[in-house]
Image (cartoon, rainbow, N blue to C red):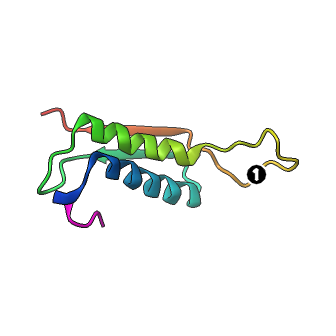
Amino acid sequence: GLGDVTKLADNSWRKVGIALGRHMKGAKVKKATLVVDDVPGTKISAESVIELLEGVALVQYNFDELKTKPNSKAVPLEKLTLAVDAK
């Protein structure tokens, strides 16, 4: 879980995104939809959503150019759809 949501800082959302990205990468997810809604007890700002997406993106990066044997087992995330409530 997220723990005490009242103590979440914007940087915490990047860590949540990293954890989510690692999970998707480990499960070899190619396409996903991320539904972003307010967490009870807090408001998710646009900056928080950006931090979340940055975390997911950071995990997806692989630098294989200098490797003699590129990571052929890596499955890139091809599409991430973001769904938000436009209140």
Q: Nearer the viewer, residue 27 or 14?
A: 14
Q: Quadrant of residue 49?
A: top left
Q: Quadrant of residue 44?
A: top left
Is the residue 12 above or below the residue 86 in the image?
A: below
Q: Element type at marker 1?
A: loop
Residue at image x 56%, y 39%? 78
Residue range in magenta is: 1-5
Q: Is residue 54 visible?
A: yes
The percent coordinates of residue 1 (x first, y second) are 30, 67
The percent coordinates of residue 29 (x first, y second) are 54, 52
Horizontal side of residue 66 vs 15, given as left or right: right
Residue at image x 35%, y 37%? 50
Q: Is residue 4 magenta?
A: yes
Residue at image x 49%, y 52%? 21
From the image, give the main secondary structure of the stretch colored magenta.
loop
Q: Nearer the viewer, residue 65 or 11?
A: 11
Is the residue 57 above or below the residue 20 in the image?
A: above
The percent coordinates of residue 47 (x first, y second) are 28, 36
The percent coordinates of residue 17 (x first, y second) are 41, 50
Q: Is residue 30 visible?
A: no
Q: Label 1 neighbourhood size at 10 Å, few (<14), some (14-19), many (20+)?
A: few
Amino acid under disc 1: Asn
* Residue marked by disc 1: 71
Q: Is residue 39 magenta?
A: no
